[in-house]
Image (cartoon, grey):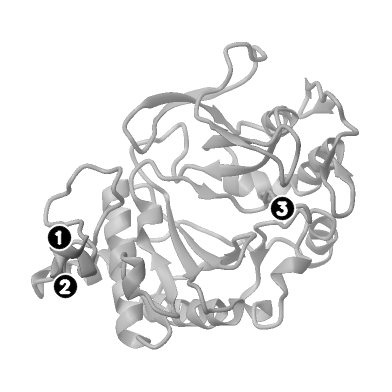
Amino acid sequence: MQVAGREVAVSSPDRVFFPARGETKLDLVNYYLAVAEPLMRTMGGRPVLMQRFPRGAGGPSFFQKRVPEKVPPWLETTVVQTVNGTPSNALVIADLAHVAWAVNLGCLGFHVWPFTAANPDFADELRLDLDPQPGTKFAQAVEAAHELRALLSSLGLEGYLKTTGKRGLHVYMRLEPRWNSYEVRSAAVAVARELERRRPDLITAAWWKEERGKRIFVDYNQNAPHKTVFGAWSVRDKVTGPVSAPLFWSEVDSISPESLTLASVPERLASLGDPWESMRPQSLEPLLEMHSRDMAAGLMDAPWPPVYPKQPNEPDRVAPSRARNPEAH
C-alpha cells in the first residue's frame, strides 16, 4: 500500500482479525486511514508500546517494547525507559505509514507515552482513568466523569473525554510542556483525593482493592513515569473491535460504548467531527496547588505500583488487612 507517501507491505491482508463481523487486517489498516487526522493530532510524534496479536483479537498476544532489528529505513524510533527502568528502542508514530507498518505486525491498537519523542523530559498529557470496580456499571463511570468535569471547570480547566474501549472512561488534559511525570502524577493524586472527598459514595482514590468497594477508582498511577495508556482512536483486542473513542460531553449520558467499533467510528467521525479538535495545552498549576495543600495538611504520597522503587513520603506498601494482622498472611 501507499501510505503517507511510503510503500508499506501488508501481508495476509484477508486474515480475519475481528471474528464478530469478519473484519480483516486490511480493514484495520483502512480504519486507521479513515481516522487519520484526529489520530495523528493525539498520537503523532509520540512513542508507542506495541502489543501484537498475530492471530487477531481474542488470540494470544505479547508486548514488544523494542522494534524488530529489520525495519524499513524510514521507520522512526526513540529510546524510552520502561517501568522497570530498561531502555527500549520504541516506535514513534511519525505518520500513518508507521501505523500501517505496526498493524501489519498484528498491533490492533497502541499504548501511548505521555510525551513526544522530540521533548521527552516533559509529560504533556494528564490522563485520568475512571476505572469501574466489581459491582459497578458504565453509568457510574459516567457520573464520576461529570464530577471530574465539574472539579476541573471550577479551576478553570477543561477535560476531554473518551471511552477506554472496555468498561471505563478516560479524561485527558493536554498540558504545557513544563512538568515531568512525577509532577503530573502528583496532580492526578490530588484530583483523585478531591473527588473522593466530594463523592465518597461514588468515587475512591484507594490503591488497595480491598478498600475500593463498589465505586469508581481514579487510577492516578496511570500517570506514573514510563507508564503508557491505551490511545484515543485505538482498537481493542476484542472480537467486536471496540474503539477507545473520544466523546462530546453532551453525549456521554446516552452513548453505548459497545456501539463504538472500527465499523461505526469512521462514519461517526465524518458526521460529528472530532470531539478533541479544540484540545489545547493548559496549566497544571491549579492541580499542583491542590497537591501542595494536601501535603501541608499532613497527607503522605499515595502508594506506587510494586514495580517502582520506594518513593519519598510514600506509605508502606502493605495492604491494610495485612498491616492489621500480619500473622494471618
The percent coordinates of residue 100 (x first, y second) are 74, 32
Pointer 1 residue: 315
Q: Of helix, strand and loop, which one carries label 3?
A: loop
Outermost residue to the front: 328
How far separated are the C-alphas under marks 3 and 2? 42 Å
Q: Between disc 3 and disc 2, whose residue precedes?
A: 3
The percent coordinates of residue 33 (x first, y second) are 79, 41
Write down the quadrant of residue 108 in the picture: top right
**Amino acid marked by disc 2:** Arg
Q: Between disc 2 and disc 1, whose residue precedes?
A: 2
- On screen, residue 237 versus residue 69, left or right, reads right
Compared to residue 145, the image places residue 63 above or below, namely above
Q: Quadrant of the N terminus?
A: top right
Compared to residue 234, the image places residue 2 above or below, namely above
**Mark 2 Cα within 10 Å, few/some/many (few <14, many 20+)?**
few
Write down the quadrant of residue 73 in the picture: top right
**Amino acid marked by disc 3:** Lys
**Nearest to viewer (mark 2 / mark 1):** 1
**Amino acid marked by disc 1:** Pro
**Nearest to viewer (mark 3 / mark 2):** 3
| Residue at horizontal 35 percent and vertical 27 percent from the top | 86
Pointer 3 residue: 238
| Residue at horizontal 60 percent and vertical 82 percent from the top | 139
Pointer 2 residue: 293
